[in-house]
Image (cartoon, rainbow, N blue to C red):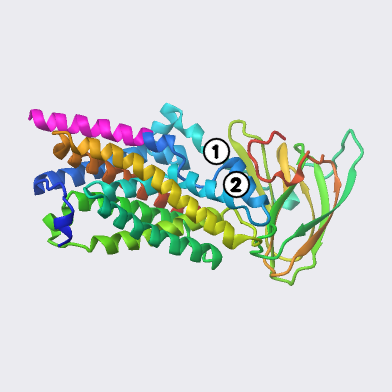
Amino acid sequence: MMRSEQAVAAPSRKTLFTVLIGGTIAASAILVGFVLPAEYRIDPLGIGKLTGLLQLAGPERVEVALPPTDSSGSLARFYPVAFRTDTVEIPLAGAGDADGTDDLEWKVRMRTGGTLVYSWSVDAPPEEFYSDMHGESAPTPEVKVVTYHKGAGIESNGAIVAPFDGIHGWYLQNQAERPVVVRLKLSGFYELPEDPYAGSNSQSTP
Amino acid sequence: MRTSVSFWSKLCWLLALSLAVSMGAQAHGVAGDDAAFVAANQGTQIVPFLYLGAKHMVTGYDHLLFIFGVIFFLYRLSQVALYVTMFSLGHSITLLVGVLGGIHVNPHLIDAIIGLSVVYKAFDNLGGFRSLFGIEFDQKRAVLIFGLFHGFGLATKIQELNPSRDGLLPNMISFNVGVELGQLIALSLMLGIVIVWRSRESFARQAVLANAAILTAGLVLIGYQLTGYFVQRGA
């Protein structure tokens, strides 16, 4: 019934198998050779590297491990400029609220060896706030990334020494239904970027 | 021997063409300034959302490939209208229900199913289900069901942009009408091409090649999106 209205190509079974097998081989070749290197930096055949397609996938991210806290080379650090202090209030909309953002990034710029001391707290219910303190470098050509601390919690106090030049700070996510405000106090040897909310943008030059 | 060589050279040519077309079209997401508009917008904005909907459809190669597969062998305009209406009905339901009801589906999995719809339609055009498995699907129902998945795909693209709740209903209806307008524009172009193509003697043989190419493109879409799903989960 349906077919009387609709013509179809009716190749032989042999041609159909050829199409299926040929199509699968061609699709796999396009995927492995081009799409995966360019989109996800997955390059098993090395074609992405050979053709430069890998550059489309963005810079490679290299995780920098933090040395254990008690094995620092020197516990004394000195800087050519005075430390600065900032206090910031960061409002976040209720979770899933379409009229505002319930998560964002806030970061400062630091040089290798720069020290930052901070405290933040948020008026959210415990377990309904998530943060991820991390840093990342400009692409050179790979991007160095470091994770300082992440998890649920409504306050955090600490100090970090930047392992590389880059932007360092927080991803903050409100999981409570009502809007909240993060109160952040920080001191140390860092600079405020033009837009601290620019977030994890590998293209930004620290 | 000679025919098989020319088969493969033509297939390669078609693949290159479909690859070029898909690279030209930005299938996924609403990019750049458009995204900033949706995120910052408050209140009802009929024409901008109408335009965004149309633009998303005209440049969305996954939707276009499926529609192309659907109309490939539809000779009567009334049939084209019927099938396209089924598709529109399907994707309108899930676009509106998805966005207004706040239903979140994983975009990679949805896009993989959209890729599957492309593979399905190409294989069906080749008579594959009947000839290899001896089964036949109700075509109208299949188009409606895959339309539902395409609508969830549209919904995830809008949801990624966090649209304001203020004026969401009129804006989404505008977006939806825009999608239908864009589809109509793309459809007229594709119909024009297919009608001219069908009048040529070589059509019957090229039809097999063309659907082989569509099938291949659908397989690439599935692999692309499934890899994206697993990469995202691993991260």
Magenta part of the chain: B1-20
Per the rendering, the mark at residue A37 is none
Do discs 2 and 1 share a chain?
no
Q: Chain of mark 2?
A: B
> In this orientation, does residue A5 appear?
yes
Question: Quarter-wise, where is residue B208 in the image?
Answer: top left
- Residue at the spot 12% in from the left edge and 33% down from the top edge: B4
Per the rendering, the mark at residue A60 is 1
- For numbered disc 2, what is the local secondary structure? helix
Where's residue A63, x and y in %? 60, 44
Question: Quarter-wise, where is residue B9 in the image?
Answer: top left
The residue positioned farthest toward the bottom in the image shown: A125
Q: Is residue B9 magenta?
A: yes
Above or below for B104 versus A118: below
- Residue at the spot 25% in from the left edge and 54% down from the top edge: B79
> In this orientation, does residue B235 appear?
no
Where's residue A55, x and y in %? 51, 32
**Badge 2: how crowded within 10 Å, few (<14), some, or many (20+)?**
some
- How would you classify the magenta stretch by its main secondary structure? helix
| Quarter the N terminus of chain B occupies | top left
Q: Chain of mark 1?
A: A
Amino acid at pointer 1: Glu
Amino acid at pointer 2: Ala
Check disc 2 and report the residue beneath it: B35
Label 2 to label 1: alpha-carbon separation? 26 Å
**Badge 1: how crowded within 10 Å, few (<14), some, or many (20+)?**
some
- Residue at the spot 58% in from the left edge and 49% down from the top edge: B47
Where's residue B115, x and y in %? 35, 51
Where's residue A14, x and y in %? 9, 46
Q: Is residue B192 magenta?
A: no
Image-based side of A11 in relation to B121, left or right? left
